[in-house]
Image: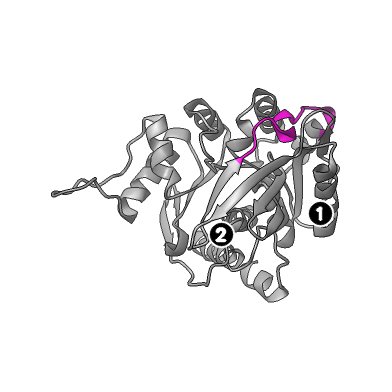
Amino acid sequence: MGAGFLIVGLGELLWDLLPEGKKLGGAPANFAYHARALGDDGLPVSRVGADPLGGEIQARLAELGLPGEHVQVDPLRPTGTVHVALDPRGLPTYTITPEVAWDYLSWDEALAALAAKADAVCYGSLAQRGPTSRATIRAFLARTRPGALRVFDVNLRQSWYTPEVLRDSLQRASIVKLNDSELPVVLEALGLPSGETPHSGQGAPHSGRGGMADGCRALRQAFGLRLVCLTLGPEGSLLVTEQGVVASPGVKVEVADTVGAGDAFTAGICHHWLRGTPLARTAEAANHYGAWVATQVGPTPSVPADVLAGVR
């Protein structure tokens, strides 16, 4: 494409095995796809196996217009797969195959050169479950320019994270994005205040938007983050900066599945943050884009021009 900013999705690349068939997946690759759809140079960085599924991923990347030159091929390990089950609301649960190619993403001079050029990079916790890929992700982040945007999209999956990975990833980030179920888990893992509001009567404490905003502030302050993005599903999102909190309402849609909706949201945030868009408009655009993706099946649907026009 050669237009806009150079934006890297760094980490897992795999097949999501959905009830209706397999779809290209992995949050960083989904993010790169949506960054490219919005007009930037979205680029996936990952590793696949030297097997039929890996060949199919390379072919699918080409169909989607995503460059594959930084997708390594592993001669020993299989291409990653994730079994995705959807509940009646379209919300996914994931069963992730261990010891696959993207666990062995290797540092090389090509990645060093790419890191030095990137305007933004998005990474998560899942691809850091193994020491090889974790070391590569950390090396990539260390080689980015001081002004580059480093987006930690938490994406907690099963038990594939540790407090140490969360802490290190946050220390390297300028922006963090997480959802309302991940926030209390992250805060507890790091020993930060949860923002829960005590109440009288039976049951556990509750945490409304005010409490969640407090939790986001605690996270931002602890790690010197420029922005904390909290997605609230159909309730919209909270964006928290040093200057304050922007609460953006949800968008009512008929959900097909939510796989990839958060990645589209993150791409929308990144797109507008790099351009200096006011925060309220940034939140609105990201919410609408994520909501539209939730109306589609799979994480990388073809995006109509009118949807893109409303998000950009």
Residue at 66%, 41% in the rendered image? 148
Its colouring scheme is: one colour
Task: Indicate whether residue 231 is drawn in magenta.
Answer: no
Question: For the residue labelled by badge 2, is the local secondary structure a helix, a strand or a loop?
Answer: loop
Q: Determine contact: label 1, label 2, CB under 8 Å.
A: no
Within 10 Å of disc 1 (Cα), the crowding (few <14, some 14-19, many 20+) is: some
Q: Which residues are magenta?
A: 96-110
Of callouts 1 and 2, the N-terminal one? 1
Residue highlighted by disc 2? 258
Q: In x, y percent, where is residue 155?
A: 55, 43
Q: Relative to the observer, which residue lies in front, 284 or 53?
A: 53
The answer to whether 259 appears left or right of 106 in the picture is: left
SS for tag 1?
helix
Give the quarter of the image for residue 131. top right
Residue in view at x 67 percent, y 33 percent: 141
Q: The N terminus is located in which quarter? A: bottom right
**Residue corresponding to mark 1:** 60
Assign the C terminus to one quadrant of the image. Answer: bottom right
Measuring from the top left, give residue 279's x and y in whole percent: 51, 59
Q: Residues within 10 Å of mark 2 (few under 14, many from 20)?
A: many
Say what amino acid the circle numbered 2 marks: Thr
* Residue that lies at the very extreme toward the left in this rendered image: 201
Residue kind at label 1, given as amino acid type? Arg
Residue 184, image x and y in percent?
Answer: 38, 41
- Could you tell whether 232 is left or right of 73 in the image? left
**Residue 220's mark?**
none
Residue 201 on image: x %, y %: 13, 49
Pick the front one: 125 or 52: 52
* Residue that appears at 85% across and 45% down: 55
